[in-house]
Amino acid sequence: MERHQIPLYLLAIAAGGLFGWLLPTAAGTLETATNPVLGLLLFATFLGIPFAKIGAALRDGRFMATVMVLNFLIVPAIVFGLSRFVANDQALLIGVMLVLLTPCIDYVIVFSGLAGGASDRLLAAAPLLMLTQMLLLPLYLLIFVGPDLVSVIEPGPFVEALVLLIIIPLAAAMLVQRWARRARAARRAAALMHNLMVPLMMLTLAVVIGSQIAGVGQQLRSLLAVVPLYAAFLVLMVPMGLLASRIMRLDAGSTTAVVFSGATRNSLVVLPLALALPESLALVALVVVTQTLVELIGMVIYVKVLPGLIRRPAAGAGAAGAAGAAGAAGAAGAAGAAGAAGVRSRGLPGN
């Protein structure tokens, strides 16, 4: 199953979209199931990470500095520039800002690992990324959007996501790993969760897409305006991540992790926050979901392209390798946008 996981993920996206479109009354149930399913996926993910190496990852100052600078200095500048294209629509602007200013702390670990990235370092960085975005997001929105918006955003969903999706699954995984050292039952449970990784990822994708796909279809005309922005973000973050990693002289695994960290956004975690906004901003949640659709297609391409792309400069490609990186990034972004549109067209009539 692991050898076929990419087409399986695409199948899950299509199945979730079709189910949600045919049975729109199930959206509420699927929405309620999102956090438990995602928490279970993260538990399985954390269980496969060698925690003995996390201390070394935390002490890797170059990696941590690269991830933090990329996500909280470089990304905001890029997002501000891209957001100018929808600055005249408050819901689109808030949605784009909300999702693109928050780095992913969950399935980025899965996708980075599939591409050979340093998942243990991303795991070590996840709590710091989560806390930092909680602190900086209101500031970014205050600067980029204005003070009127900040007053309607509550930190509760972020705190809930941190506890339910990071702290509890992480603590449970650590306990199971310690238990597995002396108990066969724990080792069997760990092996079972490892085998369930792909099905859990498929279930998560299907539940998230199914819970929101009907709304995406109803607001398609407005949402199409943000698809090129999300694709452009994927394009830009490849050379940005590669450049930052090269300046810090990171190895291939760390470079892969940095690129994924810069490109993947916290859509699944900020969705509860988007849903908590006033009725006048109901479109924001759909803007977030649209980013998920574009990003998932982009991540499939990242997993295929980045391993070879990152290793070419090490072989002495030099400036030509950097140019190739930018070109491949453009192809990935364009394909991601087209793929996202294809997903919607398969799931939505008249789309």
Image (tube, grey):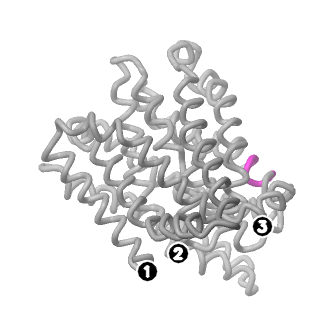
Q: Residue at x 65, y 65 (%)?
A: 180
Examine the rendered structure and indicate whether residue 8 appears above or below residue 14: below
Disc on res. 162: none
Examine the rendered structure and indicate whether residue 170 appears above or below residue 110: above
Q: Quadrant of residue 346?
A: bottom left
Q: Which residue matches tag 1?
A: 3
Q: Is residue 66 magenta?
A: yes
Quote the CA–CA distance across marks 3 and 2. 18 Å
Amino acid type of the residue tagged 1 in the rendering? Arg
Q: Which residue matches tag 3?
A: 246
**Of the residues under marks 3 and 2, which one precedes in the sequence?**
3
Position of the N terminus by quadrant: bottom left
Q: Which residue matches tag 2?
A: 305
Can you see residue 257? no
Q: Quadrant of residue 317?
A: bottom right
* Between 222 and 5, the one nearer to me in the picture: 5
* Between 151 and 88, the one nearer to me in the picture: 151
Crowding at dot 3, Cα within 10 Å, few <14 / some 14-19 / many 20+, comes out as: some
Instruction: Report the magenta residues as a range.
Output: 65-69
Q: Indicate the secondary structure of the residue bearing disc 2.
A: helix
Q: Indicate the secondary structure of the residue bearing disc 3.
A: helix
**Of the residues under marks 2 and 1, which one precedes in the sequence?**
1
Q: Residue furthest bottom?
A: 315
Crowding at dot 2, Cα within 10 Å, few <14 / some 14-19 / many 20+, comes out as: some
